[in-house]
Image (cartoon, helix red, strand yellow):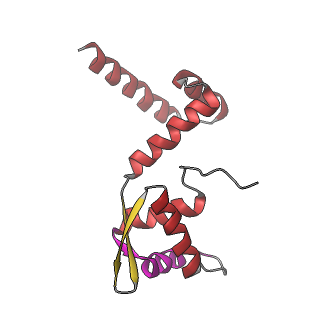
Amino acid sequence: MSRTKSDFLTQSGRMIMDVLWRHGVLSVKEITAFLNVDKNEDKQHVYTTIQTMCKILTQKEYVSFEKKSRAFIYKVLITKQDARKTVLKSMLQQFFGGSSLSLAQHLLDENEIDFDDLENIKQDIINKKNKVVK
């Protein structure tokens, strides 16, 4: 049985997207080079694997490509913020029944949150509340 297609970014897909978000429009060769510079391990990324991952990202509509001579040039179609929204929205539905409150309570219960971060979140809530009331 084959796996169902996911619209989410895999870890490999996210690494490629991070390179594109940082550096802009790139060829597969350039993406591979950036990934290999960033990687601190003996095992290097292989061009054909990156090319396959870029094709998958195209199918998921995260990137588009243009063929120039023999090179495929990729550019992002979705911002990092929009990618986060997509993942969070799906996670919210899948694990928290669509409840933002359940997610927030889970984060508070399961994570050590710095007091200053809590104060910043509190201020964000106050600001958001003031915008809604106006």
Q: Residue furthest top?
A: 133
- Of residues 102 and 98, the one drawn nearer to the viewer in this rendering: 98
Q: Is residue 73 magenta?
A: no
Q: Is residue 30 magenta?
A: yes
* Chain part drawn in magenta: 24-40
In the image, 43: left or right of 123? right
Residue 127 is drawn in which quadrant?
Answer: top left
Q: Give the mark count.
A: 0
Q: Quick one: quadrant of the N terminus?
A: bottom right
In the image, 76: left or right of 60? left
- Of residues 83 and 105, the one drawn nearer to the viewer in this rendering: 83
91 shown above or below 1: above
Q: For the point 45% across and 48% down, which residue is it?
A: 83
Q: How far from the left and from the top, in percent, is residue 113?
A: 57, 35
Q: How far from the left and from the top, in percent, is residue 72?
A: 40, 77
Q: How far from the left and from the top, in percent, is residue 92?
A: 56, 32
21 shown above or below 122: below
